[in-house]
Amino acid sequence: MVSPIHRKQLQDLIQKYQVNGPRYTSYPTALQFNDRFTDQDYYAQVEASNQFVVPKPLSVYIHIPFCASLCYYCGCNKVVSRKKGIANEYLEYLYKEIELQAALYEDDRLLEQIHFGGGTPTYLTPKQLEELLGVLAQHFHLALPNKLELGIEVDPRSVNEQTIAEIIGLGFNRISIGVQDFDSEVQVAINRVQSKEQVTSVIDAARRNGVKSVSLDLIYGLPKQTKESFKRTIDEVIAIRPARIALYHYAHMPNQINSQRLIDESTLPTSRDKISMFSDTIGRLIDAGYVYIGMDHFALADDSLAQARITGGLQRNFQGYSTHAQCDIIGLGVSAISNVNESFCQNTKSISTYKEMLAKNTLPIEKGISLNEDDQIRAGVIQRLMCDGVVDYNRISEQYHIQFESYFRDELVSIERLAKEGIIYLNQSGFKVTERGRFFLRNIAMVFDIYLPKISLQKAGQTSYSKTL
Amino acid sequence: MTAPEVDSQQNQSRCSVCALGKICLPVGLDNSDMGRLEEIIKTTKPYQVDDKVYEAGGPLRNVYAVKSGMFKSYIIDADGNEHIVAFHLPGELFGLDAIHAKRYISTAKAIGTSTVCAIEYESLTSLSLKLPTLQRQLMNLMSKEFSSAQALLAEQSADRKLAGFLLGLSTRFKQRGYSETTFNLAMQRSDIANNLNMAPETVSRMFKRLKNEGIIELNLNEVSILDMPQLQVLSGCLSTC
């Protein structure tokens, strides 16, 4: 845990290293995706992925972009509407996309993981979800139920005990719930009012129906939040004892996210307060038996995520962390990101373009990147850093047939500097993130990001990234 | 996997400095004889994936020795189906099937970026008449090709075929100075399936079985043989593969 004596030191360090930087849910980051990447490139990557002697299993992410109301803080790709008909129309095109995508993959590639995100996936009725799962099962080869991870993000305001029971009846075994904050003043300020009872009744219903893995999403740095109010929220979360917790930082970027202009800047907590909230929360969660997985994520020690952290089966991806380290990820729906073989690509964010392209039987890919050898090596280093907090020179050298120390000669100069700050332990064979260094994973990863200097020159004065803390 | 030292560009067709000299054509030749062989050898530009070296039916001009990378040879049957007859590793000769008909029987294609030494066939024939050592090695290499093609013809269970395939590669890699226990499979799953005459799904199932039984470790297409004796037992042929 973080002792009070060290907390002061830590706060100084956080102050010093608080820079704008990517969150490395991918490397290269989404800013490197470009429109030179076409469906032909995607086909080539899929074909290569089909041709391993044992091809990787598949994971599908499905983006449901609709929400019944607007949460001011949210930067996700979404459409706010109460017309239920729009979802049906969207689903028709989604089915087309599923059909086109599934046809590219060899029949023996098992679909082991399905995750619904949004927007609000529970904008869909249990009936619509059932139909959608049916279409997936028709076109993909689904793993057996006990091997299939089926997850959904739940907005507690969009469900009741009955609908939760129905959703779980469809086979969902992981749910994550957007709590953000239990404080009612904060909830008003972000336009997301949901009582604690609403949240707990959903969790209870899920647990009664056999879901072991409940995950809660929290956000610190929201308007009206204080150290005291956030502490109360954390107390309530600890009492609920979800298997996993995601603690996100609110990045106020009103120039890029229109709805954030509806947030009164004067009510935002100060940097110093946010740092306290963050470090207090970590200390309290760890005392309560949670393991810090990395970046924004915590899990109970017996949860598969915490186990995977020990066995090296952890993967950083767009949903945070996953235990499915060996999957090709297919993103379906508007703005969804795929990670197949050595590539990333993203669908168009526009629903109308999405429909137009699928009507012409083309995949709605807007941009992407095929990783070159250097990208692959750096992605490997950043993966290890984000997932195990350890970079072993020999392991990377063997894996990528390089000599780490000479390949990363310049980077190692910066690494030495971080070692002097106590952010990492450094020795002859590699380096390891220290306890306090865990707060600076992004800073360490940035050292290995070859695109970073170029971007900061190009976009000088512009803030494209959120603050690291 | 670390490759054997490849000689520098200016010496590209010089057998005397090629790391593959100990297994390729010039085995046993002394320096002056090797010089005569070098005179009829040309190194070509690198072939990229799926580039053809020659096509079935084309007139025999050269036989080829793989210098780096890997090639596959396949024939097309009456129904238009492709059958991969062999994968060629560095130091191995291909194109020899054309000697009888003076036309290539198969088509040879690169698997990934690869280079070859082209040896003018007529000159090779006349030179081998003057150099018995060269003739003997040529016969040796042809016989090797012949016997591995025969091994594929036997009716065998899928796991036996795959074990034999891996052992064969292991032996060939070892002869070339690579690791015999850890190597990367440059060929595609469908190519292996085609070569061994089984479905691609079966190839994967057999690989998974070998992995689950602790006989191999698999990291994408990198194979590590953990239990060589067991793999030999599975393959059913202890010494000849």
Image: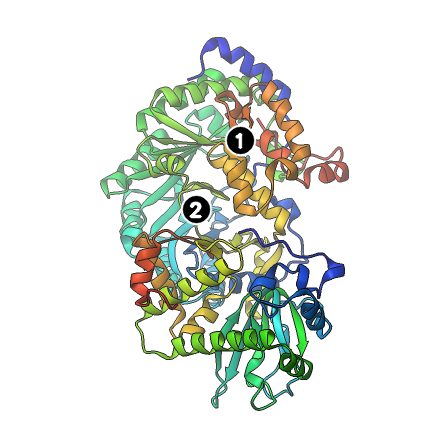
> Which residue is labeled 2 in the image?
A325
Quarter of the view holding residue B102: bottom right
Query: In 3D space, how far apart are the residues under numbered discs 2 and 1 (Cα atoms)?
Result: 25 Å
Percent position (x, y) of residue A50?
47, 63
Residue B74 horizontal/vertical position (percent): 52, 79
Q: Earlier in the sequence, mark 2 or mark 1?
A: 2
Give percent across and percent down for residue A38.
63, 62
Q: Is residue B16 left or right of residue A299?
A: right
- Residue A429: numbered disc: 1
Binning the other alpha carbons within 10 Å of mark 1 as few (below 14), some (14 to 19) or many (20 upward) gives few
Q: Is residue A277 left or right of residue A199?
A: right
Indicate the chain on which mark 2 is placed.
A
Q: Nearer the viewer, residue A441 or A150?
A: A441
Q: Position of residue B119 (x, y in %)?
A: 67, 76
Q: Amino acid at mark 1?
A: Ser
Indicate the quadrant where residue A421 lies: top right
How many numbered discs sit on the rendered protein?
A: 2
Q: What kind of residue is marked 2?
A: Ala
Density class for disc 2 (Cα within 10 Å; few <14, some 14-19, many ≥20) is: some
- Corner quadrant of residue A302: top left
Q: Tell me the number on the disc at residue A231.
A: none
Asked if one can make out residue A74 in the rendered structure from this viewpoint, the answer is no
| Picture quarter with the C terminus of chain B | bottom left
**What residue is at 30 percent from the left and 67 percent from the top?**
B236
**Residue most extreme to the top:** A5
As helix, strand or loop, the secondary structure at mark 1 comes to: loop
